[in-house]
Image (cartoon, rainbow, N blue to C red):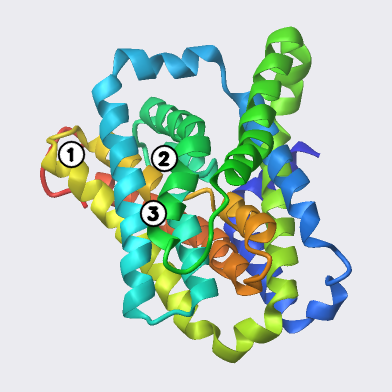
Amino acid sequence: MKKLCKFISDYMGMLVLLAAVVALLWPDTFTHIKPTAINPLLGVIMFGMGLTLSWHDFQVVFSRPLDIAIGCATQFTVMPLLAFVLARLFRLDDALTIGMILVGCCPGGTASNVITYLAKGDLALSVGMTGVSTLLAPVVTPLLVLLLTDKTVDVNVTAMFLSILWVIILPIVAGLAVKRLWPQTTKRAIGYLPALSSLAITAIVLIIISASARRLLSGGLVIVAAVVLHNIGGLTIGYLVGRLMRLAIPKRRALSIEVGMQNSGLASSLATLHFATYPMATIPGAIFSVWHNISGAIVARLYIHNDNKHTPSTDEGDI
C-alpha cells in the first residue's frame, strides 16, 4: 500500500495531466459530479497539510521575519499584477480575466513545499511562507480581487473571506489539533497523506475540466498560454527578487517556488462559489493545477542538475 501511495505522490504531475486529458476527451462521463464537491476535496487537502505541520514550523515567522515578509510581499504583488497584465495582453474575456486574477491573488499551494524539498531549497522558509500567506488570504485575497476586478464584477468581500476561512483555515487548524491530540495515530497516517492530496487535486481538475471541456476546446490555447506564462513569470521573478535581496541560494529557490506555485484549487473553488455567472472563471485555476505541478518538477530537476555542475557554496550563476 505504501509503495502505491509513493508512486501516486511521485507522479502527481502526470496523474493530474492524465485526468485533464481524460476529462477533455470524455467530459460527459464526469459531469454528474457537481462542482460543489470541490470545497470538501480542498478541505481534505488543507486538513492533510495541517496534519503534517507543527507549531514549531511557524517559529520561522518569528525567527526570520524579514525572509517571510519579503516572500509574502512578493507573492501578493507579483502574482496578482502579473495575472492582470497577462489578461490584458491576451485580451481575455471577463470570465477568464476573473479566473486569472483569482489564481494570482491566492496564497501559496501545498505542493510548493514538496517541490522546494526536491529542489534542495530552504524548506523552513517554504513552509513558513505557505502558512503565513494562507493565514493572510482571508483578508488579502478578497481585497486584491476587489481592487483588480471592480470594473468588471461586483465582488462580495465578506462572503469570500468566510469561504477561505471555512475551506482553508479551519481544516488546517483541525489538522494541527488532531496531530496534537493523537500524535501516534497521525504519525502512522502521514505516509499516506501525499497520495491522498494528489488524488484530491486530480479529482478537482477532473471536475472542473469536464464541466467546461467544450468551451475550453473551442478556444483554450490562449488561456493555456496565459496560465503557463503566469506560472513561469512567478517562478522567475521570485528567484530574481531573492537574488536582488542577496538571499542565499536555498532561500532564492524557496522564494521562486512559493511565488510561482499558487493554491489554484482555492481559486477554482472561489470562482465556483462567487462567480457562478462566469462559468469559465474556474478554468485558469484548473489549468494552473495541471501545469504548475509539471513545471515545479522540471524546475526542481534543473536546480539539482545545476548543483551537479557547480559547487553548492557558489552564490553566483545559479538560475
- In the displayed structure, does residue 55 sit left or right of residue 79? right
Instruction: Using residue 62 as the reference point, say whether residue 35 is left or right of it.
Output: right
Residue that appears at 52% across and 62% down:
288
Q: Residue at x 68, y 55 (%)?
A: 273
Does residue 4 appear to the left or right of 236 in the view shown?
A: right
The 10 Å Cα crowd at callout 2, few under 14, some 14 to 19, many 20 or more, is many
Q: Amino acid at mark 2?
A: Thr
Q: CA distance from mark 2 to mark 3?
A: 31 Å
Q: Amino acid at mark 3?
A: Leu
Which mark, residue 311? 1
The answer to which image quadrant residue 316 occupies is top left
Q: Which mark is residue 67?
A: none
Which marked residue is nearer to the observer: mark 1 or mark 3?
3
- Residue at horizontal 42%, vertical 67%? 151
Q: Please tell me whether residue 47 is drawn above or below residue 277 in the rendered image.
A: above
Give the CA separation, mark 1 to mark 3.
Answer: 45 Å
Give, as a three-letter code, the residue at label 1: Thr
**19 w.r.t. 112: above or below:** below
- In percent of width and height, residue 32 lies at 89, 69
- Which residue position holds label 2? 116
Identify the secondary structure beneath mark 2. Answer: helix
Q: From this viewpoint, is residue 301 visible? A: no
Which secondary structure lies at badge 3?
Answer: helix
Q: How many marks?
A: 3
Which residue occupies the foreground of this view, 305 or 160?
A: 160
Q: Which residue is mark 3?
A: 147
In this rendering, the label closer to the viewer, 2 or 3: 3
The tag earlier along the polypeptide, 2 or 3, is: 2
